């Protein structure tokens, strides 16, 4: 399974999970539920997720380090400020929030199960390899950061 580590760009994972959610919602309409104002709540979550992810990207760019999660050893600095004071992975958290908003929009119970697939995939094949690389590059400084700031939120 190590061959899948850091191979698929996380935005592509978000899109793939989103498409799977839509397909599941179309295939299982009998499991729908009703939630008043779900469209507004879904839109709000989508926007907050996008802004969270964009803040992560902007912070990396301001620090002049790579935003490309497929090139793990090309990080030039450890970013621990801005949105990274709240989450070690705001870009992935933003993707999760956008997917949660999409699941709310779809109002389909099985679609919510795919949120767990996203978290499990990103943890195993993206975050764990990144943490290994960052520990290798920034050693004690990164380990101290891991103690201070949670992986997701």
Image: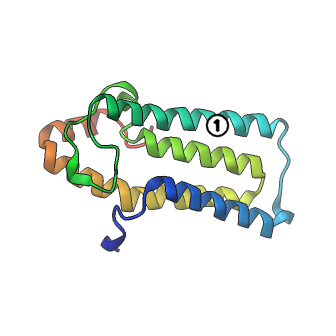
Image location (x, y in percent) of residue 11: 49, 52
Closer-to-camera residue (143/23): 23
| Quarter holding residue 146 | top left
Left or right of residue 112, residue 5 in this image: left
Left or right of residue 79, residue 114 in this image: right
Above or below: residue 117 compared with residue 62: below
Scheme of colours in the image: rainbow
Q: Looking at this rendering, what residue extends furthest in the top direction? A: 82
Q: How many marks?
A: 1
Image location (x, y in percent) of residue 111: 69, 59
| Quarter holding residue 7 | bottom left
Please, what secondary structure does the residue beneath circle 1 have? Answer: helix
Quarter of the image for the C terminus: give it: top left
Image location (x, y in percent) of residue 17: 59, 60
Above or below: residue 45 compared with residue 126: above
Quarter of the image for the N terminus: give it: bottom left
Residue at x-position 73% and y-position 46%: 104
Residue at x-position 65% and y-position 61%: 19
| Quarter holding residue 77 | top left
Left or right of residue 134, residue 128 in this image: right
Closer-to-camera residue (48/143): 48
Image location (x, y in percent) of residue 101: 67, 44
Above or below: residue 1 compared with residue 137: below
Above or below: residue 72 compared with residue 146: below
The residue tagged 1 is: 45
Residue at x-position 31% and y-position 71%: 2
> Pointer 1: residues within 10 angstroms few (<14), some, or many (20+)?
many
């Amino acid at each position: 399974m190590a061959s899948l580590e850091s191979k698929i760009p996380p935005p592509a994972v978000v899109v793939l999970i989103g498409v799977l959610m839509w397909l599941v919602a179309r295939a299982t309409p009998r499991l729908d539920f009703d939630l008043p104002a779900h469209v507004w709540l879904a839109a709000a979550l989508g926007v907050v997720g996008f802004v969270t992810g964009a803040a992560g990207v902007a912070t990396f760019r301001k620090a002049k380090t790579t935003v490309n999660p497929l090139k793990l050893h090309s990080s030039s600095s450890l970013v621990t400020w801005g949105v990274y004071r709240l989450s070690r992975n705001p870009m992935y958290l933003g993707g999760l929030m956008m997917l949660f908003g999409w699941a709310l929009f779809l109002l389909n119970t099985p679609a919510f199960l795919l949120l767990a697939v996203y978290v499990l995939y990103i943890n195993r094949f993206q975050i764990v390899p990144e943490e290994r690389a960052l520990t290798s590059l920034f050693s004690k400084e990164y380990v101290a950061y891991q103690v201070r700031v949670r992986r997701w939120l």
